Image (cartoon, grey):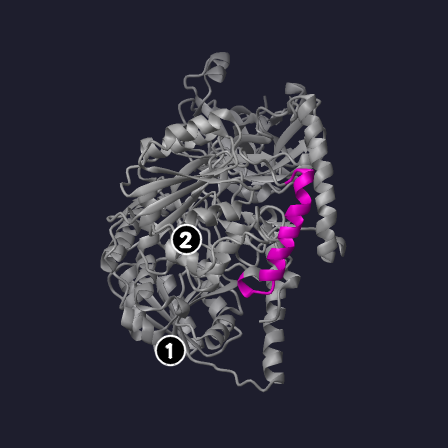
Amino acid sequence: MADIDGTSDTGVSARFSGYFDRYESGRASGWVANLLSPQSIVSLVALIDGVEIDHVLCDGLRPDVRQALGLGSARVGFTYDIPPAYLDQRPHVLSFLLPDGSALAHMGADGLRGLSPSLAFTSGPHVALEGQLDGLVHHALRGWVLRRDGHDGPLSARCDLLVTCDNVRVGQVRADQLRRDVSSVMQCDPNCGFEFIIPAAFRKDYPQRFRVFVLPEMLELSGSPLTTRTVSDYLEGRLLALASDMSRVHGDLERMRREIDRLLPTEGYHLDDYDRWARRYYERLRARVAAGRQQARAHGTPAEDPLVSVLMPAYRPLLADFVAAVDSVIAQTYANWELIIVDDGSRSEPLTAQIDRFCQSDPRIRCIRRAKNVGIARATSLGMEAARGAWVAFFDHDDVLVDVALEVMVRAAARTGAKLLYSDEDKLDQAGYFREPNLKPDWSWRYVLGCNYVCHLTMVETATMRAVGPLRRDYDGAQDHDFILRCAELLDHRLIHHVPELLYHWRITPNSTAADVSNKQYAIEAGVKCVSDHLARLGHMATVRSINGLTIYSVTFLATEEPAVSIIIPFRNETETTRRCVEALLDRTRYGNYEIVLVDNWSTAREAASFLDEIAANPRVRVLRVVDEFNYARLNNLAASGNDAAFYVFLNNDVFVSDADWLHRLVGEATVRDDIGIVGAKLLYPNRTVQHAGVLVGTHGVAAHAHLGVPDDDYGYVGRAVLSQEYTAVTAACLLIRAALFHDIGGFDETHLRIAYNDVDLCLKAHARGWRIIWCAEMVAEHHESLSRGSDMRPDQEARLFREQQVMLERWGDKPFFREDPYYNPNFAKSGRLFHQLADPAHRPPL
C-alpha cells in the first residue's frame, strides 16, 4: 500500500479500498470502503472523457465484500448508469475519482493482473425485451413484444419487427395490435401484439426457419427461430400452385384492360412504411398547391382570401411543442389569418413570456388569458366568441399545421360552398416520424356516431358556428365530437365537405390522447353521453356503449315498429344447408312481421322435394319454384315481383343467423332516416374472420370487400371493421332494401349481370339517386361463402366473370363515385391490400 496521501501501484488509495469491477450495457458497478472510517459512505466523482459528469454514492449493499474483507458495513457498493448522451455507439472513456483525487482502479477480465485507472467503452442504449413469438396460425406469425429502453425505463409497445425466412428478408410489421391478455398480466400498453401474414411466395410444403427481430437493434424475439411448414400437405401445395397459375391467367386479362400494370414498375407504399410515403406526399402536396395557384392566375380566377380565425386553447403545453405549433401557423402560405391563443390558467411564466413575444412580433396573434383553469370546452368557446374571421379553424396547443393547410381549406370552401370542412390527419412522434394516418371517408353520419373521425383539421363558417353554439363543458373530452354532431343537426349533408389531404399532425407525447386513450378515460364517458344526447334530440331511440373501453361506440337502433319484411332465399338442391339457414330464421328471429320466400331453382334431389313439402307447411314460409338455369338476379326479381312487403331481405342460403334481434337491427337502421334505402350485415366465415364489412367500388377492377379476412374482433382501419357506417355498396348475401326503391330502380340486372356484381350494381343505382347505403356492424351472421354455387374463380366461370366486369366498367366507370369511392380515401391504393396499400402521391392532380 502507498502512504496516506498516495496510491499503490495498483491504483488503489491507501485511505480507500475498492474496485470498479463490472461494466455491462451502459451500467458500471463496483465498491469502495473507507478504511479509516468504515461506517462512512464514500462519494465518487464520475468522469467521462475526462469531464466531471456526476457524483456517485457507494451506499449499495455488497455482502460479498463485507464477508471477504471483514468490514463493519456492507454498504460499500455503487451502480452508475451512463447518461444516454454517451450511449451513442462512439468510443468514450469512463473513470471514477476517489475523494482524495486518486483514480479508482478498473478490474478487467484478467482480474487483479489487469487493473487500469479507466475503462474505454463503446455502447448503444440498453434495450431489454419482453415478448414471445407464439407460433403460426392460418399462414400468419403471431405474438407480442414490449421493449424497455434503459435499465429502469418503462415498457413500451408498438415495436417494429423484421421477419426473415431461411435468412431471407420477408417483410416488416409493427406490433400494435390489441393484446389485452398481455396487458392484464404486464400492466402495460395493450397495443403490443402482431400478426404477420406469410406472403404466398414463402408458403411451402417443407420446413422453413422463420425468425423475428426487433428493430433497429436486430434483437431476436423469444420463440424465434420457429421451424415449421406453412402448407400442411401435398394436396394443399398443389392447390396453391394451381391457384397461383389461375391468378396469373386472370392477371393477364386484367393487364389487357389496364396497361398501366405493365408500365413503370415502382416500389409500392403501405401503412407499415408510412413515414417514407408521407415525406413524398408532403413534397408533392406543396407542388400540387402551387400548380393550382398558378392555374388560377392563368385563368384569371380571383383569389378569395376571407379571414380565418385559428383558435388555440392552451393549458401547460410543453414549451417546445407549443412554439412549434404557433410557428406552423405563422408559416402558412395563406396569409389572412388570426391566431387566438386562450391561455387557460396555465400560470407558467415561460409560457406567458413566449406568448407575449409571439403577440408582439406578429399583430395577427392575440391572447386571451384566464386567471383560473376552466377546461378545454370553455376555453375554446372564449376563442369562438372572440373570433373576427369569416371562418374558424380549431387547433390544439401542441399539434402542427401543414404549411399549406389553410390555403387548401379556403380553396375547398370556395369551390364547394360547404359550411363545415374537415381534412385528413396523421401523427408526429417525438423522434419526428410521421405515423398512424387517419385517411378519412367523405361525410358519413352513421360513422360519426361511432367515432369522431372528423377531428382535425376542422374549419367551420363562423356564422354556422355561432348558430350551433359554443362547446359544452358537459362533454369535456368529447366536446369536439358533440360540436360536430350539433353541426350535423343544423347543416344539410351536402354542406359538409371532406378535403382528402393530410393537413394536420397530432403530436404524440406521453400525456396525449394520441399516445394512449387511457390517459383520458373521462373522454370515453363524455363520448357516450354526447352521442346519446344527439340521438335523443333527433328523436331516435338507440343504445350507445363504448367498445372495449375505447372512444369508439356501438350504436344500436332497434325497430319499434314492424313493417312487413319478405326474406328471399334462392337455392338448388343444397337441402341440409338450406334447412339449417331456414330453421335458424324460424327459431331465432324475434321480429314478428316477416315471411320467408324459398326460391327453388330446379332442384332435382329427392331430399329437396321432401324438405320443401315439409317446410311449406309452416305459415311463414312460401315456396316459389323456378325451372331455369341459374340466374341469381332473375330468381330474386321473380320473388320480389308482386310481393307487397315493405322491405325485402335478400339472403344466401348459406348465411346462418344466431342473434334473435338481427331483423330488428336491419329494419331499425333502415327506418332511422328517410334517405336510407339499403342496409347490409357483417358476415363472418366459419373460422370467425370477416367475409363482408362493406364493399368498396372502383377497387380491384370493379369492387372488393373491405377488411376481408381480418379476425372478427379486429377493429380494422380506424375502427371501420366494427363501426356501422355508410358505404357505396354492400353484398346481397344479406341485404335489406326498401321494396319501393327496389322496384323504382328496376331490381337486379338479370340480363347482363346474372351472377356477379348485380348487388353492387343495385347499390350504385340507389346511390346515384341519392339514397344512403348502411353497413350494420351490429348485425352479425355466419356465411359459408359460395358453399352453394361454388366460386367465380373456377376456369369455367372466369370468362363469364370477365364479361360481367366489363359491363360494370362500361356502366359505371366514368361516374365520379366509382372513380373515387366517397367512402374510400383516394390516398389508398385501389389494388392490393385495401386500407393498407397507399397510392403513389405523384398521381394526385393539382389543387
Query: Depth check: 15 or 670 in front?
Result: 670
Q: Which residues are magenta?
A: 793-817
Instruction: Name the residue carrying label 1.
Output: 389
Amino acid identity at mark 1: Gly
Label at residue 381: none
Q: Nearer the viewer, mark 2 or mark 1?
A: 2
Quadrant assignment, res 588: top left
Three-letter code, disc 2: Ile
Q: Which mark is residue 678?
A: 2
Whether 185 is among the magenta residues is: no
The reply to whether the C-beta atoms of the residues labelled 2 and 1 are less than 8 Å apart is no
Residue 622 placement: quadrant: top left
Say whether residue 750 is left or right of residue 112: left
Q: Which circle's residue, 2 or 1, is located before the other in the chain? A: 1
Residue shown at 30% from the left, 68% from the top: 490
Q: Main secondary structure of the magenta part?
A: helix
